[in-house]
Amino acid sequence: MTTKAMTTKAMTTNSHQNVRKALRERIESGEWELGALIPGEIALAEEYGCARTTINRALQNLADSGLVVRKRKGGTRVCKMPVRHAKFEIPIVREQVEATGAKYSHQLINQKQIAPPMAIRTRLQIPAGQKALFMETVHLSDSRPFAYEERWVNIQTVPEILDAPLETLSANEWLVTTVPFSSGDVVFSAQNADERIAEALDSKVGNAIFVLDRTTWINDSFITAMKLYYKDGYQLYSTL
């Protein structure tokens, strides 16, 4: 029995998920080489015994994931350089510290409700004069600075944070584990530590600092804008 026949026979349903999986396996096995034109929708529908719309949906999903390129009247080709998407999870700093075998703790060094500057008002879509919660936190690894956090929280969206036990549970962990979010944006950068950041991280003025700048929201309501400054020497790991 041929590989194609076995694949077709193994299909227990004609769902686009199963077709997509089968097509993906054929691409990853090298049956269709990089840049190769794969069979048309009509031929694939006949091979897999399903509707052409099912094939179309499966191919579109593969295109969305970067495995194939679809062109009108040009057919579908295996992408010459398949796109891989890096996965980024909002870090819980406590888990980052404990992953190194160190003991985590944190110090909430500032907490107040004030009207944020224009840049933060714009990011959180807060009207002029409306207050937000501002916090500064130093995350510690074996009692030594690991990261310094500046955070603004839209208390109209998350009023519960005013009663959260932030002295014992960092705002970082409380928000990640308590407040759902629908989307966000993240900017990674490096900057030289000024006196304020150097003091918070027990570093030296001018040292290169890794910065994570993030905004998150739920539906149309913005939750938080924060900057996390990691002590010099920090490295970010991700997966493809």
Image (tube, grey):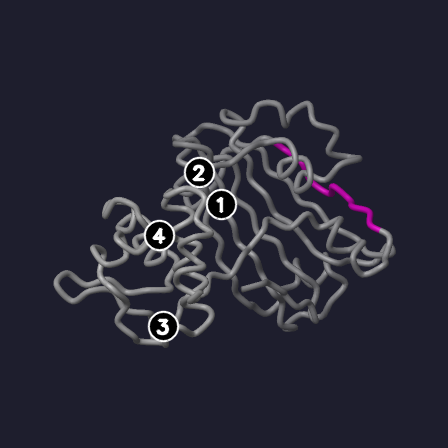
Q: Which residue is mark 3?
A: 32
Residue 125 is situated, as x and y percent measured from the top left of the image, at 39, 35
For the residues bearing labels 4 and 2, Cβ distance under 8 angstroms: no
Magenta stretch encompasses residue 106: yes
Name the quadrant of the N terminus: bottom left
Classify mark 4: helix, strand or loop: helix
N-term-proximal mark, 2 vs 3: 3
In the image, the segment drawn in magenta is 104-112
Q: Which residue is mark 2?
A: 124
Amino acid bearing label 3: Trp
Observer-side mark, 3 or 1, equals 3
Q: CA distance from mark 2 to mark 3?
A: 47 Å
Specify the principal SS of the magenta part: strand
Q: Which residue is mark 1?
A: 215
Q: Residues within 10 Å of mark 3 (few under 14, many from 20)?
A: some
Q: CA distance from mark 4 to mark 3?
A: 17 Å
Q: Is residue 137 left or right of residue 10?
A: right
N-term-proximal mark, 4 vs 2: 4
Does residue 179 lie above or below 208 as drawn? above
> Which of the two residues, 217 or 113, is positioned nearer the viewer here?
217
Classify mark 3: helix, strand or loop: loop
Which numbered tag is attached to residue 61?
4
Q: CA distance from mark 3 to mark 1?
A: 41 Å
